[in-house]
């Protein structure tokens, strides 16, 4: 999001006025400017959100209809990540503009609370993968900011593309924003899945901040997942392919659980322990969710060349799949 633009809004009667931070996120989204609630809270604390010309006092303040909000976004903080050559990466492709990684399960994409090091970004920094970014006068240290344009959950394996230059980063972000990316995941779910398309709103869960949900009363962001049955397994589980039109956080896991009634095998956050003892034992031995980003296709953001990358199933997923076939 551009940080040199000030957004000005007049609050309408139907806007979510109960909390200032939630209201700002919603108003920005209407302008096509995505911002997290935590980022907006920082802007409020730093005096960058004004109500009728005065700095907002609280992130949870109630705002009256008719009030004028002025929002000046703030550049995200520079990464404090350090290079870590001990993080081993499986590189599928790289050039001066981007790098494509086959991410293993268990690897966190970027540093966060509880994961200060040992992440994909730490490993990429050790390769010098971000030293191609040009210096921006408005952000001289911007070349230190990792080029993450999409993520995979820690316990999801598969294909991930990372930008190495500002031009590639902005180009990839535009492709994702237009949903002009071909993405297919494979998953084993508990129960009898069916072919179909799930087109819902997805937002943060109202009581569990770790989770997302489709039960948002019309709020949140649109999410579209196309599910195709690949194989019905002897154990009462199903191997499916999921094509994404959008890429919301936990989208596949939420759709398969809440709308399909078929949670991803081994999903500790959205699923429950399988009733079948054999299936439960397979999930326990696997130790993670059975979800794999199998395919990623896109046009190169700089050259325009069509590119497609496919990741084979990791050994632990292949082994558990074979057990479920033979149950």
Image: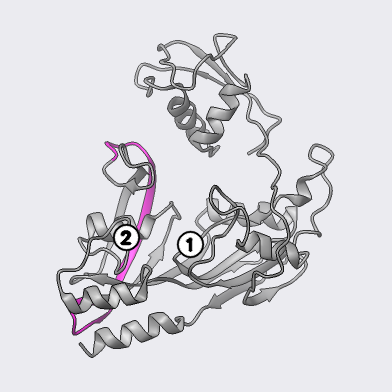
- Per the rendering, the mark at residue 235 is none
Is 86 displayed left or right of 217 in the figure?
A: right
Can residue 79 be seen in the rendering of this structure? yes
Q: Which residue is mark 1?
A: 154
Q: Position of residue 192 (x, y in %)?
A: 18, 72
Give the camera-side residue of 58 and 280: 280
Q: Earlier in the sequence, mark 1 or mark 2?
A: 1
Q: Residues within 10 Å of mark 1 (few under 14, many from 20)?
A: some
Check whether the beta carbons of the residues at disc 1 and disc 2 lie within 8 A of each other.
no
Is 33 displayed left or right of 247 in the figure?
A: right
The residue at 32%/63% (across/down) is 267
Give the camera-side residue of 230 and 90: 90
Above or below 49: residue 233:
below
Above or below 81: residue 232:
below
Q: Which residue is mark 2?
A: 268
Q: Position of residue 294 (x, y in %)?
A: 46, 74
Q: Position of residue 266 (x, y in %)?
A: 31, 68
Which element is circle 2 on? loop
Q: Which image quarter holds the N terminus?
A: top right
Q: Which contiguous range is marked in magenta?
A: 216-237
Question: Where is residue 299, by image quadrant?
Answer: bottom right
3D distance between C-alphas at marks 1 and 2: 13 Å
Which element is circle 1 on? loop
Give the camera-side residue of 18 and 42: 42
Is 37 displayed left or right of 8 in the figure?
A: left
Above or below 132: residue 277:
below
């Amino acid at each position: 999001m551009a940080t040199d633009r000030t957004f000005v809004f007049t609050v309408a009667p139907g806007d979510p006025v109960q909390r200032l931070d939630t209201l700002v996120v919603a108003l920005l989204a209407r302008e096509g400017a995505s911002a997290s609630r935590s980022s907006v809270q920082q802007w409020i604390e730093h005096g960058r959100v004004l109500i009728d010309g005065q700095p907002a006092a609280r992130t949870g303040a109630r705002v009256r209809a008719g009030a004028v909000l002025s929002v000046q976004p703030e550049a995200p903080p520079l990464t404090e990540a350090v290079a870590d050559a001990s993080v081993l990466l499986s590189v599928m492709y790289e050039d001066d503009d981007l790098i494509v990684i086959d991410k293993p399960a268990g690897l966190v994409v970027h540093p966060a609370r509880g994961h200060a090091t040992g992440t994909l970004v730490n490993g990429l920094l050790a390769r010098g993968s971000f030293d191609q970014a040009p210096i921006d006068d408005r952000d001289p240290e911007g070349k230190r900011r990792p080029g993450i344009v999409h993520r995979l959950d820690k316990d999801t394996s598969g294909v991930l593309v990372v930008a190495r230059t500002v031009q590639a980063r902005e180009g990839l972000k535009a492709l994702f924003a237009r949903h002009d990316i071909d993405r297919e995941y494979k998953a084993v779910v508990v129960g009898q899945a069916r072919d179909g398309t799930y087109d819902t709103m997805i937002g943060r869960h109202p009581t569990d901040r770790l989770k997302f949900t489709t039960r948002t009363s019309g709020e949140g962001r649109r999410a579209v997942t196309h599910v195709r049955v690949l194989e019905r397994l002897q154990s009462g589980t199903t191997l499916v392919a999921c094509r994404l039109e959008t890429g919301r956080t936990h989208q596949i896991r939420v759709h398969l659980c809440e709308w399909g009634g078929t949670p991803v095998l081994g999903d500790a956050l959205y699923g429950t322990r399988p009733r079948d003892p054999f299936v439960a034992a397979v999930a326990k031995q696997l130790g993670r969710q059975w979800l794999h980003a199998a395919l990623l296709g896109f046009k190169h953001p700089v050259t325009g060349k069509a590119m497609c990358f496919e990741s084979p199933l990791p050994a632990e997923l292949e082994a558990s799949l074979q057990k479920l076939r033979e149950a």
